[in-house]
Amino acid sequence: MNLQQLFKMQKELDEFIEKTQKIEHDVFKEKGLALMVELAELANETRCFKFWSTKGPSARDVILEEYVDSIHFILSLGLLTGYTTIERWPVIEEKRDLTEIFLMTQNYILTFISQPTEDKYFAIWQCYGLLAYNLSFTFEDVVSAYIEKNKENYNRQRSGY
């Protein structure tokens, strides 16, 4: 499976949500903010910035689920802007400090929301490729978790989430 297949799945989910929720306005900024929130939730589960605490990170599956929550919004933002030509998962095998990566990613997201260019969008993907590597997630891990969360998102819409 490549990213084009994930874009297709996300497009179908977005259309389902728009129909179910009767969304008729531009939700670009809401999805941008949602992506920032999901990134913060991911950081919170890694606990990488919590220098004051001795408690370790959440379980790998919890961190992976938070990670793919972000992927849903990255794909969705790409669909809204027409930046859907990316096909391959951005593999960036570089060990970096997680806090540094989260701050850099948040900065790219904020920049993209105010100036939604394809280069800025691609930079977000690169950050997530770097995050995946530093969290020891493979593309297969991400795809599998994305598919599961995608199903859950449909169920949530059907049950009035």
Image (cartoon, grey):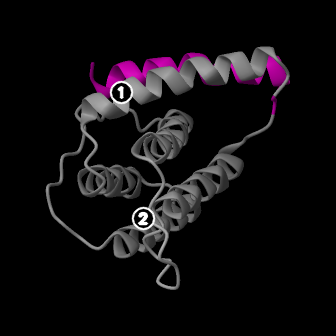
Task: Identify which amino acid the numbered label 2 is placed on.
Answer: Thr
Quadrant housing the C terminus: top right
Q: Position of residue 67 (x, y in %)?
A: 46, 46
Q: What span is in magenta?
A: 1-24
**Secondary-structure class at tag 2:** helix
Q: Is residue 27 left or right of residue 7?
A: right
Q: Is residue 122 left or right of residue 114?
A: left
Q: Which mark is residue 33?
A: none
Task: Identify which amino acid the numbered label 1 is placed on.
Answer: Val
Is 79 or 107 nearer to us in this picture?
A: 107
Q: Which mark is residue 143?
A: 1
Residue assigned mark 2:
105
**Secondary-structure class at tag 1:** helix
| Mark 2 Cα-neighbour bin, 10 Å: few <14, some 14–19, many ≥20 | many
User: Seen from this angle, which residue lies furthest front?
Assistant: 54
Q: Is residue 42 left or right of residue 105?
A: right
Q: Residue at x 23, y 45 (%)?
A: 90
Q: Residue at x 73, y 40 (%)?
A: 26
